[in-house]
Image (spheres, rainbow, N blue to C red):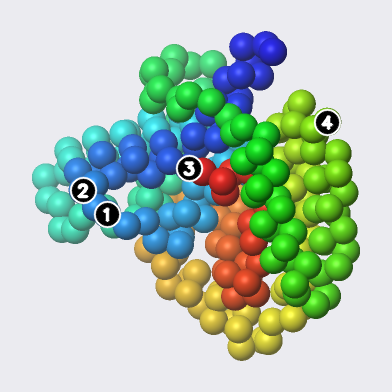
Amino acid sequence: MSDDSQDWRLNYFNYFTEVEEHFQQARGTALFLMSPLDWALIESWKNGGVPLEAVLRGIDAAFNKWRQKKTRTQAVNSLAYCAQAVLKEAESMAKGLPAGEGSAPAESPFPPELVRTHLEKALATVASLAGYEEIAASIARLLDVLEEQLRDLQQLDQRLSAIEEKMAAIARTRLTDDELFEMRRELDLQLRAYRSKMSTDQLMRLEKSFLDRKVYEKSGLPRLSLFFMV
């Protein structure tokens, strides 16, 4: 396995935890609880291909700027405060500008039996719900050839994410207009103070991640991506 492939596996599966811990450290409050908006923002960065190092550097840059303010009227209570700085760091890295060391990745990807258990539990949940027979069949097919799929975890995760997209689309058609409205209202309330700090592309990815998460929760659906095994 190439070094690049190994780096992807280590960084990808550690993405969620690294960002959470780094934000807590930068904020100086280890007991700070991330909000649904924060989790959705991390997921949108991951899905958008933002390097872990760019996120960590962006968090540091945002807090450094905040600490330099002569008057700090309120604490940083959301990861969204760092969105603009993260975008700037991602753009710098894409242009090949010097990067910091980042955080050390966790030691290893998941063993095959853990992946199988994750998918078997997801299959059991989906199979118990009416209207998701096609989704259950797709998961079952992956389980049948899991040994082969495990040779390329990135491709396997892409397949699982594609199945999630289809599952979410089905779930949305089963929600009422009022339920969808309340999800959108909650998103707008949480995001209101941070919209000016994000690009249009960032906002679109964040909104999708946030609303997808709410749809899964409301419908009692499992997350399939290996990312959610962390």
Residue 157: image x %, image y %?
A: 71, 40
Q: Which mark is residue 148?
A: 4
Query: Does the residue at mark 4 contact the one at mark 2 (Cβ under 8 Å)?
Result: no
Q: Earlier in the sequence, mark 4 or mark 2?
A: 2
Residue 179: image x %, image y %?
A: 60, 83
Left or right: 186, with 5 as reference point: left
Query: Does the residue at mark 3 contact the one at mark 4 (Cβ under 8 Å)?
Result: no
Neighbour tally class for label 2: few under 14, some 14-19, many 20 plus, Cα within 10 Å: few
Query: Does the residue at mark 3 contact the one at mark 2 (Cβ under 8 Å)?
Result: no
Residue placed under numbered mark 1 in the picture:
32
Residue 126: image x %, image y %?
A: 74, 66
Question: Which of the 4 image quarters holds residue 55?
Answer: top left
Between label 3 and label 4, give the one nearer the viewer.
4
Q: Earlier in the sequence, mark 1 or mark 4?
A: 1
Identify the amino acid type marked 4.
Glu
Query: Does the residue at mark 1 contact the one at mark 2 (Cβ under 8 Å)?
Result: yes
- Measured in 3D between alpha carbons, the distance from the residue under mark 1 to the one under mark 4, in whole angstroms, is 41 Å
Question: Which of the 4 image quarters holds residue 171?
Answer: bottom right
Q: Which mark is residue 154?
A: none
Between label 1 and label 4, give the one nearer the viewer.
4
- Measured in 3D between alpha carbons, the distance from the residue under mark 1 to the one under mark 2, in whole angstroms, is 6 Å
Residue that appears at 50% across and 37% down: 15
Residue 212: image x %, image y %?
A: 63, 63
Secondary structure category for the residue under label 1:
loop
Nearest the viewer among 190 and 46 is: 46
- Measured in 3D between alpha carbons, the distance from the residue under mark 3 to the one under mark 4, in whole angstroms, is 26 Å
Nearest the viewer among 83 and 176 is: 176
Residue that appears at 15% across and 52% down: 72
Neighbour tally class for label 4: few under 14, some 14-19, many 20 plus, Cα within 10 Å: few
Q: Which mark is residue 16?
A: 3
Nearest the viewer among 188 and 108 is: 108
